[in-house]
Amino acid sequence: MLPIPRLAALATAVPAYALDQEAIAGRVSRLFAGAPQLDRLLSVFANSGIRRRYSAVPIDWFDQPHRWPDRNRCYLDSAVELLDTVAGRVLDRAGVPSTEIGGIVVVSTTGIATPSLDALLIERLRLPRNVQRLPIFGLGCAGGAVGLARAATMAAAMPAKAVLFLVVELCSLSFRRDNPSKSDIVASALFGDGAAGALLCCGGDGPAVAAAGEHTWPDSLSVMGWDVVEDGLKPIFSRDIPRLVAAELGPVARDFLRRNGLVLADIDRFACHPGGPKVIDACEEAYLLPPGTLDAERTVLRDFGNMSAASVLFVLDRLLASAKEERWRHALITALGPGFTAGFVLLSNA
């Protein structure tokens, strides 16, 4: 019988600077004064379902232009600090010393690090010299689910060791003050910064990672991603994402569940990436859930914004905390990102 990886602990962290949504809207209005259709585009702030977000830099930082090298230096410094914090919380909650870590998986798509972030953490976390490293770049919002699946696979391959899974996204550093395009304004209304981590091991009594899967839609490369430009990363996302999710996520998820001997009715808990209010609504439609069911997703979006890959782990953290006193058997984690790809992780508490 193959070893079964389990989720031993989960933790989250955000940077120090809390930004009120109304304050951000006012700052964007001033910086982009005179931009075409600005008044209409600013309505996305009020309709975002977001009250507060967190940033790696203070709001005044955005008043000045910053080229790519400056942005990436901020990314490196802040990402390593946040990952150090969240890793410490995960290890403390699991009661596992860093010397027991056999593998480390780090997901991030909002900056570039070579040596990669996992290498930059080895000394700080005092990881073993023979730790196996897996940096993952380019998954975007899907990284929380797909990265967790990769970490579970690694844990199953080394059942005597634990695997540390970390995610950090510093989306705010991509805000480009000299480019008032529609996608930049929408991104400035949605995205925030955050980090999350999990510890996986074969043993204990945490939820089992029972299965994982992915689906990439054909001819969908233009749905979501980045354009690398001189002053940073220009966001790309299609207005058709909610429609695509509502119409096509359900059949794909049902196929994934069928291959694992389940149907939608067997799922007691859903943890979906909260990409925005319309995306959350679309997930409820896709999974045949009554409107308002995905309240943890809306709470995370309200309090933190869209933190790309980290968001779905914030949702999962809340779901697992609230479900401690309630019996559940199966939970489905779903996140979507560039590709255009859906990532699924099935947790079992049977």
Image (cartoon, rainbow, N blue to C red):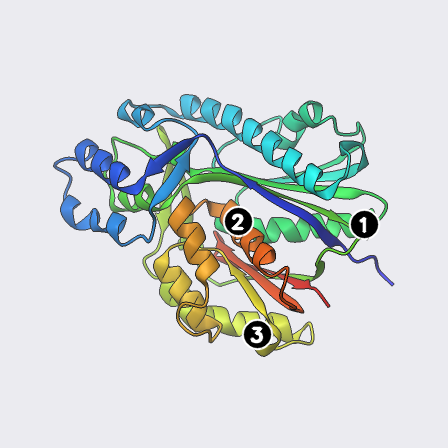
Q: Name the residue under label 3.
A: 254
Residue ID at (39%, 61%): 279
The C terminus lies in which quarter of the figure? bottom right
Spot occupied by residue 269 in the image (x, y as percentages of width and height): 57, 66
Spot occupied by residue 313 in the image (x, y as percentages of width and height): 56, 50
Spot occupied by residue 154 in the image (x, y as percentages of width and height): 75, 48
Is residue 238 left or right of 144 when viewed as pictured?
left
Q: Choose top left, top right, bottom left or bottom right for residue 57.
A: top left
Residue ID at (38%, 43%): 191
Q: Mark 2 points at which residue?
A: 314
Per the model, the C-alpha gap separating discs 2 and 1 is 26 Å
Q: Mark 1 points at which residue?
A: 157
Q: Which of marks 2 and 1 is in front?
A: 2
Per the model, the C-alpha gap separating discs 2 and 3 is 24 Å
Per the model, the C-alpha gap separating discs 3 and 1 is 28 Å
Residue ID at (37%, 47%): 236
State if disc 1 and disc 3 touch (CB < 8 Å).
no
Q: Which sits in the foreground, 130 or 236?
A: 130
Residue 10 seen anywhere in this rendered image of the structure:
yes
